[in-house]
Structures are given as structure tokens and as C-alpha cells.
Image (cartoon, grey):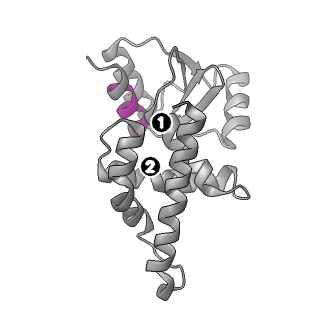
């Protein structure tokens, strides 16, 4: 299955879950502050099979909530299932021959947490200090709409994804590169 086919399959499953969620919470007029827990509980097994990785419920809840925040910040007018699917596939199904770059600044404690793991795993990651090089800051601002760091940029062919949050970056690096 190609990445695009996988994204479409994940988006279709998200849409199906949305329809079930809508029915389950119609009495609450669509208000469900724990929606991410409901979706994660109902999607974990199927998404694990589609993505080829055993998803942990808590991590999936966080990923869904993060996808929602990213959707609101970057593409609120676009349909959410394909947007979430792209983020999920790009996070859990690494592209081959990926080029990694960390947008950071050295005095940031969250950035130092990530750089320690990069050093520990001896990974080839280009460090892009957003205070030393204005172009790095501009690239980050253009891609994400803000300049909060750390952000790991993963590029391979037509895949260009930006992964924020130090703990998410660390989990990705450990899953991908730990022996």
C-alpha cells in the first residue's frame, strides 16, 4: 500500500469513527470534552493494524489532541480526517532515507532533552539553531505558523513533516533508531 493509499484508509476509518461518535453523543449536542479518549479507544486496534505499529492508548489520545490543535492552527478550513490521517501516517510510518533536522536553540531545556537523545542514539540530525540563523527561524515560522521549538523536520521525497513537542520527538527517535 502506498503512503497516499494508507492515508486514505486511515482518513476513511477516522470518518467512520466520526459518524459513530456523532450518533453516540447526539444527546450532548456534539459537546464531548473527552472526544480524544473515545476516538483512541475505538480506533487503537484498527489503526495499529493499518499503521503496522502497536499503538498505546494514552499516546494515541495525545496524538489525536495534537492533530486537532495542528488542524485548528494550520488548516481549520480543510476537512479534518485527511489532515489527521496525514499526521498519523507520517508520524508512525517513517519514509525511507529520511533527512532529519532539529529546529532548536541551545539554551531551551526541551531542546536539550531532545539533543541528549540524538547524541545517545548517535543519529545524524542536522541542528538548526533558530537564533543563530534567521533563515531557520523564517522556515519554521512559514511551515508551522509559529517559532516554538523543538521541532523535528523529517524530509524524504514528497514527504515533508514537522514534528513538534520534545517528548513526541524523543518517542519517534527511540522507536525508529533504538537498537
Left or right: 169 in relation to 8: left
Left or right: 172 in relation to 139: left
Q: How many marks?
A: 2
**Which residue of the protein is positioned furthest toward the left in this rendering?**
179
Tell me, yes or no, if residue 61 can be seen here.
yes
Residue 163 pos. (x, y %): 52, 35
The residue lying toward the viewer, choosing from 86 and 33, is 86
Residue found 52% across the figure and 35% down from its top: 90
Residue found 33% across the figure and 26% down from its top: 174
Q: Which mark is residue 91?
A: 1
Residue 14 pos. (x, y %): 51, 57
Q: Magenta segment range? A: 168-174
Residue found 52% across the figure and 14% down from its top: 97
Q: Are marks 2 and 1 in contact (CB under 8 Å)?
A: yes
Q: Secondary structure at mark 1?
A: helix
Label the magenta part by its dominant secondary structure. Answer: helix
Question: On the image, which quarter does residue 127 sit in?
Answer: top right
Location of residue 120 with respect to 89 vertically, above or below: above
User: Is residue 172 within the magenta segment?
Assistant: yes
The residue indicated by pointer 2 is: 63
Left or right: 145 in relation to 85: right
Question: On the image, which quarter does residue 166 sit in?
Answer: top left
Mark closer to the chain start, 2 or 1: 2
The residue lying toward the viewer, choosing from 150 and 9, is 9
The residue carrying pointer 1 sits among few (fewer than 14), some (14 to 19) or many (20 or more) residues within 10 Å by Cα, namely: some
Location of residue 82 with respect to 160 vertically, above or below: below
Residue 116 pos. (x, y %): 35, 22
Amino acid at each position: 500500500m502506498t503512503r497516499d493509499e494508507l492515508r486514505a484508509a486511515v482518513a476513511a476509518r477516522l470518518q467512520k469513527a466520526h459518524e459513530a461518535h456523532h450518533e453516540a453523543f447526539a444527546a450532548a449536542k456534539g459537546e464531548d470534552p473527552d472526544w480524544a479518549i473515545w476516538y483512541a479507544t475505538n480506533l487503537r486496534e484498527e489503526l495499529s493494524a493499518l499503521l503496522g505499529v502497536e499503538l498505546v492508548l494514552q499516546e494515541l489520545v495525545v496524538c489525536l489532541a495534537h492533530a486537532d490543535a495542528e488542524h485548528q492552527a494550520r488548516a481549520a478550513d480543510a476537512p479534518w480526517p485527511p489532515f489527521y490521517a496525514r499526521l498519523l501516517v507520517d508520524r508512525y510510518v517513517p519514509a525511507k532515507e529520511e533527512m532529519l533536522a532539529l529546529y532548536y536553540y541551545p539554551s531551551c531545556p526541551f531542546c536539550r532533552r531532545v539533543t541528549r537523545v540524538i547524541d545517545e542514539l548517535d543519529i545524524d540530525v542536522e541542528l538548526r539553531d533558530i537564533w543563530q540563523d534567521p533563515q531557520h527561524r523564517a522556515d519554521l515560522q512559514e511551515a508551522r505558523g509559529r517559532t516554538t521549538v523543538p521541532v523535528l523536520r523529517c524530509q524524504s521525497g514528497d514527504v515533508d513533516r514537522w514534528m513538534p513537542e520534545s517528548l513526541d520527538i524523543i518517542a519517534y527517535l527511540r522507536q525508529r533508531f533504538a537498537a
